[in-house]
């Protein structure tokens, strides 16, 4: 239960279009590290990944160039992966060694077009990557230790559906979501096929929308939470695949005010906010979820509770990440060329 | 530029540009574009895209049918090239600003001013609505208006500071005259000047002192070419390190007189303590001299000031009311006179000290000759009048008269920027103020400063809001806002804040907003969603429908049929959805084989679908996408 939570928010100007931002596992030094995907429209072909350190992220410690604008960024314990709008994938073990980067170029063998679904966690060692793109293709990329990668095409929808998000649930299962196709659950053990689908609930009388982000909690692998267009957030429990649970959205709930009315760009399960329902694993309630949106709102939504707004900014929040090693800290990428770091109260009484 | 075809040639002829010799207009710069299309280029299409981007599409002649055979290489039949015409000139800051503030910093100021501007406009609209409904102008609400403007002004003023320029640790050197402060910018100086003179009504009686404070902060920016008190002191500061006997140097006394004349009392007292007579080994010999120096220092630090309070570290005796001040001034002047006439001067051995201190005393008594000699710029002389000669000057007429007198005594050639601005303010000429802002400080300043000018000034209000036929029937206020919005639109990072300004322009704003939104590229889905969000906020339903339709066609043509159909559905584009549905109905209903189905589909969409099993799953996928368009059962 959050009693007196103090919030401190610091805005750091970063004079580029900051598209995506992620925490990096902090190394031996005490400074916290961030990876930011930036784009400078004044300089053509200027798309970079910046390594920034807190408390002063004004100038990057290192910078890596990408062939086109980054559309997905994900961090595994050892590798930072970025996917781009031309359809290429870049696996970077180290920021300081550009030669160690492994790239999978875009093209007929991989993706053509923006790849927004990217996640790490599949396969035996948990180091396989799933990529899902707007071209309707889904791949699994396994990185060999010797610098080579094995790319396997799981699916080619040939444009019938465009995917926007992907997330591993277990080493053999992952979920994807896209434009007008809702959410799909894939099982690799069943021949790389979709075993369950859900259209989602979009409120407002709309039949369908675009899924922007999916998250799956490591302790509840059958539930995924989905954020999409028009402020829609819902949870999909595989045990009841035809009854998705609305968490927020325009027109979903007669009386409750939706937390936002525009695109929900990212959703993440929030480990810091303690659920008001203390009983944990047997509960059927959905754990609290943090979201960021185009109207500049960063909030925590919980099933049947009033949403808790953490930030209300005059500009859009395009991306955010919760520090896995320190869940009270949240970094977000603001539309107006800045990076914001939100620190939630460290109450000495809270454990 | 194409000239007019002389023989009335075919439409689309490109005619070479020929310039008459002796033409006054300079030839336009010619740029070569590498487009990679093999000659001959049969068609060229040119259109402006978002911002400063020009899109040039070069198309070569179509490849003949059946030519080449399977092994032929593909020749690019056409290319679209984006040319960035930006760079140089019209940024959001004017001449002065661009030197001091870099682009990223200017953008930061632009972003920060959007919420303040939007809040002020919404308050203005609320007041106007309330007035329209109640029909009785609410006097109290209008009286409160200047407070909203003051809040707006303070919010924006705080953005203009540069706190990072302050060094982290400052070692307090006892011999510093001018402390390191945050580096002033002329943008902040001009903003504060407008705030002081136009908005802050609380200050009315203490305006002169507030001006003296302003000068203390921004004296360094007054002019680049001529001398100022600030420059005098910095020059002396550099000399100070090497000086052994401070009081022998005439610059020491000049510096003291200059600082005293503009009211920098703390600096004067500090500098007086550099006097040689304070040194321990000299104290016994120069007791009288030291006594005189100290007496002057004490008098300086107790000078009466007509103001309610002083910031920490500043010196003076504050008087809140006029009678208090007059009484204190009389008493203080009496003390100065007494010191001036005392016998101790004869005993003072050092000539320069005697003359220098007496000069300071004459300044304190308000002697115009000494003040004129001590100050370097007419603005400084102007400020010194407020302190020593006419502390009760209020009202623009009096101040303007005084300013003219000072300009005559200290003529200046450099009359732009801050001095020009002040001239315009004092002569109560909002046109001059606006012109100066435009020239020196740029469109951002003009757009936001207009609110300050109209806070309490009926003439400025009328001048800015009157609709003028010579600029197309819009008001000056709208004109300046449109200019600023165009500057914002020219950069792909700031175009999203332009709608706030465009929506406040009643005549042409919405039309230009629609054009801006329709010009945004649709290749990136995220950008399309952001554009549609703006359409939703400003209730531009037809614009969003158009954007969705264009997006739908784009994605359909490039093979992303699912996305294309989704956009058509969002746009409620029945026509195209019906066509798609009809084609598929015909194909599936005829129970054709998979291969021919694909051929038909590919001919419809114009894309190649590879051969191979076309699963039922995919067919179902396409069918389910069309949703409600289908009203027959698919077996």
Image (spheres, coloured by chain):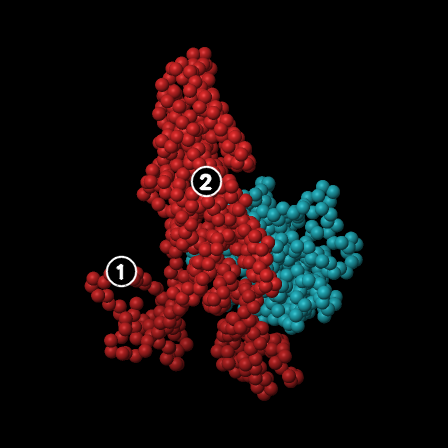
Chain colours: A cyan, B red
Residue A125: which numbered mark, if any? none
Left of B419 or right of it: where is A28?
right
The local crowd at label 1, few if under 14, some if 14 to 19, many if 20 or more residues have their Cα within 10 Å, is few
What secondary structure is marked by label 2? Answer: loop
Q: Determine which quarter of the picture holds residue A248.
A: bottom right
Q: Residue at (39%, 20%) from the top-left corner?
A: B353
Q: Which residue is drawn at 39% across and 36% down?
A: B381
Residue furthest top in the image: B284
Q: Do the residues labelled 1 and 2 touch (CB within 8 Å)?
A: no
Q: In this view, does B344 lie above or below A121?
A: above
Q: Is mark 1 on a helix, strand or loop?
A: loop
Left/right of residue B309 with respect to residue B29 in the rendered view: right
Q: Between disc 1 and disc 2, whose residue precedes?
A: 1
Residue B352 versus residue A78 in the image, above or below: above
Tell which subunit mark 2 falls on.
Answer: B
Badge 2: how crowded within 10 Å, few (<14), some, or many (20+)?
Answer: some
Q: Which chain carries label 1?
A: B
Q: Where is residue A134 in the image (x, y as percent from the top left)?
A: 55, 67
Q: Is residue B555 above or below residue B594?
A: above
Task: Determine whether, in the image, residue B138 is placed left or right of residue B463.
Answer: right
Q: Quadrant of the N terminus of chain B?
A: bottom left
Q: How many badges with numbers are in the image?
A: 2
Question: Which mark identifies residue B26?
Answer: 1
The answer to whether residue A242 of the structure is visible from this angle is: yes
Where B247 falls versus B92 (above or below)?
above
The residues bearing labels 1 and 2 have C-alpha atoms spaced at a distance of 53 Å
Q: Nearer the viewer, residue B15 or B162?
A: B162
Q: Where is residue A40 in the image (x, y as percent from the top left)?
A: 46, 55
Q: Mark 2 points at which residue?
A: B393
């Amino acid at each position: 239960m959050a009693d007196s939570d103090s919030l401190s928010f610091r805005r750091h100007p970063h004079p580029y279009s900051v598209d995506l931002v992620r925490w990096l596992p902090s190394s031996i030094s005490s400074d916290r590290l961030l990876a930011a995907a930036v784009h400078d429209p004044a300089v053509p072909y200027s798309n970079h990944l910046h390594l920034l350190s807190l408390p002063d992220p004004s100038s990057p410690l290192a910078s890596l160039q990408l062939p086109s604008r980054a559309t997905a960024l994900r961090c595994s314990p050892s590798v930072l992966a970025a996917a781009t709008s031309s359809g290429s994938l870049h696996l970077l073990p180290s920021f300081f060694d550009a030669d160690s980067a492994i790239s999978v170029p875009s093209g007929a063998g991989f993706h053509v077009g923006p790849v927004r679904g990217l996640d790490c966690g599949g396969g035996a060692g948990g180091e396989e990557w799933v990529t899902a793109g707007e071209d309707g293709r889904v791949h699994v990329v396994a990185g060999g230790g010797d610098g080579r990668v094995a790319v396997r095409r799981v699916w080619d929808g040939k444009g019938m559906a465009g995917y926007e998000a992907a997330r591993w649930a277990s080493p053999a299962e992952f979920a994807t979501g896209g434009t007008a196709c809702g959410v799909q659950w894939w099982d690799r053990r069943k021949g790389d096929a979709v075993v369950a689908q859900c259209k989602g609930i979009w409120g407002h009388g709309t039949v369908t929308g675009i899924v922007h982000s999916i998250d799956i909690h490591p302790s509840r692998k059958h539930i995924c939470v989905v954020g999409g267009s028009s402020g829609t957030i819902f949870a999909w429990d595989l045990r009841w695949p035809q009854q998705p649970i609305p968490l927020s959205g325009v027109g979903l709930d007669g009386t409750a005010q939706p937390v936002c009315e525009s695109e929900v760009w990212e959703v993440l399960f929030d480990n810091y906010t303690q659920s008001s329902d203390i009983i944990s694993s047997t509960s059927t309630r959905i754990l609290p979820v943090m979201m960021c949106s185009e109207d500049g709102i960063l909030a925590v939504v919980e099933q049947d509770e009033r949403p808790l707004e953490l930030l209300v900014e005059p500009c859009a929040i395009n991306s955010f990440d919760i520090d896995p090693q320190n869940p009270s800290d949240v970094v977000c990428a603001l539309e107006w060329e800045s990076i914001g770091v939100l620190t939630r109260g460290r109450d000495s009484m809270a454990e | 530029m194409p000239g007019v075809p002389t023989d009335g040639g075919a439409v689309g002829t490109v005619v070479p540009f020929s310039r008459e010799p002796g033409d006054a207009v300079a030839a336009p710069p010619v740029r070569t574009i590498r487009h990679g299309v093999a000659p001959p280029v049969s068609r060229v299409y040119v259109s402006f895209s978002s911002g400063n981007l020009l899109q040039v599409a070069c198309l070569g002649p179509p490849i003949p049918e059946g030519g080449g055979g399977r092994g032929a290489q593909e020749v690019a039949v056409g290319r679209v090239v984006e040319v960035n015409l930006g760079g140089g000139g019209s940024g959001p800051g004017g001449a002065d600003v661009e030197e001091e503030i870099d682009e990223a910093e200017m953008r930061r100021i632009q972003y920060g001013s959007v919420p303040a501007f939007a809040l002020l406009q919404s308050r203005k609209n609320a007041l106007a609505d309330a007035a329209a409904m109640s029909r009785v102008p609410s006097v109290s609400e209008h009286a409160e208006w200047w407070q909203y403007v003051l809040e707006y002004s303070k919010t924006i003023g705080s953005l203009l500071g540069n706190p990072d320029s302050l060094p982290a640790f400052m070692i307090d050197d006892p011999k510093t005259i001018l402390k390191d402060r945050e580096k002033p910018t002329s943008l902040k100086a001009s903003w504060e000047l407008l705030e002081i003179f136009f908005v802050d009504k609380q200050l009315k009686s203490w305006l002169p002192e507030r001006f003296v404070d302003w000068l203390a902060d921004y004296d360094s920016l007054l002019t680049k070419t001529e001398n100022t008190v600030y420059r005098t002191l910095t020059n002396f500061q550099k000399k100070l390190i090497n000086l052994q006997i401070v009081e022998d140097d005439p610059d020491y006394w000049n510096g003291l007189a200059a600082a005293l004349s503009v009211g920098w009392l703390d600096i004067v007292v500090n500098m007086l303590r550099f006097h040689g007579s304070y040194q321990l080994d000299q104290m016994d010999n120069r007791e009288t001299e030291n006594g005189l120096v100290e007496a002057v220092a004490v008098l300086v630090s107790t000078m009466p000031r007509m103001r309610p309070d002083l910031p920490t570290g500043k010196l003076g005796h504050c008087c809140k009311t006029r009678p208090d001040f007059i009484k204190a001034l009389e008493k203080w002047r009496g003390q100065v006179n007494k010191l001036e006439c005392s016998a101790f001067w004869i005993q003072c051995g050092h000539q320069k000290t005697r003359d220098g201190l007496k000069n300071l005393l004459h300044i304190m008594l308000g002697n115009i000759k000494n003040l004129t000699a001590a100050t370097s710029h007419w603005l400084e002389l102007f400020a010194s009048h407020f302190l020593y000669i006419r502390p009760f000057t209020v009202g623009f007429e009096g101040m303007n008269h005084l300013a003219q007198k000072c300009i005559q005594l200290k003529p200046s050639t450099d009359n732009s920027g801050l001095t020009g601005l002040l001239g315009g303010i004092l002569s109560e000429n909002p046109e001059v103020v606006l012109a100066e802002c435009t020239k020196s400080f740029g469109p951002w300043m003009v757009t936001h400063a207009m609110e300050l000018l109209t806070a309490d000034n009926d003439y400025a209000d009328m001048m800015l809001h009157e609709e003028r036929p010579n600029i197309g029937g819009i008001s000056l206020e709208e004109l300046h806002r449109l200019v600023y919005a165009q500057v914002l639109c020219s950069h792909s990072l700031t175009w999203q804040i332009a709608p706030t300004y465009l929506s406040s322009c009643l005549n042409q704003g919405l039309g230009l907003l629609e054009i801006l939104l329709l010009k945004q590229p649709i290749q990136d889905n995220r950008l399309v969603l952001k554009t549609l969000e703006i359409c939703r906020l400003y209730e531009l339903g037809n614009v969003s429908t158009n954007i969705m339709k264009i997006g739908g066609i784009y994605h359909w043509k490039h093979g992303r049929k699912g996305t294309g159909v989704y956009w058509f559905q969002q746009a409620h584009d029945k026509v195209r959805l019906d066509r798609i549905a009809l084609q598929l109905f015909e194909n599936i209903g005829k129970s054709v084989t998979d291969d021919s189905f694909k051929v038909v589909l590919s001919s419809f969409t114009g894309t190649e679908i590879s051969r191979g099993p076309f699963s039922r799953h995919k067919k179902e996928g396409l069918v389910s996408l069309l949703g409600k368009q289908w009203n027959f059962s698919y077996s």
